[in-house]
Image (cartoon, rainbow, N blue to C red):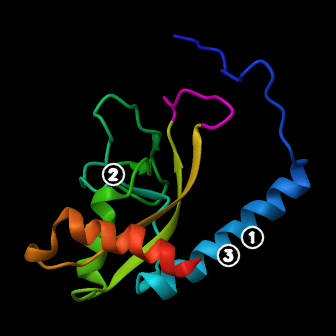
Amino acid sequence: MLRSILIPERYQSRLNRLETAVAIQKTKSYFKTGFEKALRLIEVSSPVMVKEGTGINDNLNGTERTVSFDVMDMKEGRVEIVQSLAKWKRSALAQYGFTNGEGLYTDMKAVRRDENMDNLHSIYVDQWDWEKVICDDMRTLGTLEHEVVGTSRSYK
């Protein structure tokens, strides 16, 4: 089913392309510093593709079609372009040996071929993602509010 890109009728960017690129990089730099300082997170590179069938590529709501292809030097299977890192982040916390109160963040690059495109959404996804190790008794709304809301207030 072919859909058209939805852009509001009177939408006009306030920045030109170069100004937009500079603003994005400055924002990323600001968040990187904030993540590391306020949330005790370390930047870790995330995969762009994963081996098909490993269960690492989160298929979001189960209806999206992945972008996959074979690799010349891989005899078995295919690889998929990442759509979500939800499962990968939890696995990475264990693989890197993070302990309680520590965590990681990554600048995820993904392709979501079934995304509804508009002035805010694209099939190409470039988003920050983070995960932190917490003990079972800390899995509360209060912890979430402290980590996210409380930290954002102290970082201003």
Q: Secondary structure at mark 3?
A: helix
In this picture, is 80 found above or below 147?
A: above
Do we see residue 46 in this rendering?
A: yes
Pointer 1 and pointer 3: residues touching (CB < 8 Å)? yes
Which of the two residues, 104 or 97, is positioned nearer the viewer here? 104
The kind of residue tagged 3 is: Ser
Who's the residue at 40% across and 74% down the image? 150
Apparent side of residue 111 relative to residue 61 in the rendered image (left or right): right
Q: Which mark is residue 57?
A: 2
- Distance from the alpha carbon under mark 2 to that under mark 1: 29 Å
Which residue is the site of mark 3?
29
Which residue carries the number 1 mark?
26
Q: Give the residue type at disc 1.
A: Lys
Magenta residues, start to end: 113-122
Q: Which mark is residue 84?
A: none
93 displayed left or right of 34: left
Q: Residue furthest top?
A: 1
Residue at 30%, 35% (x, y): give it.
61
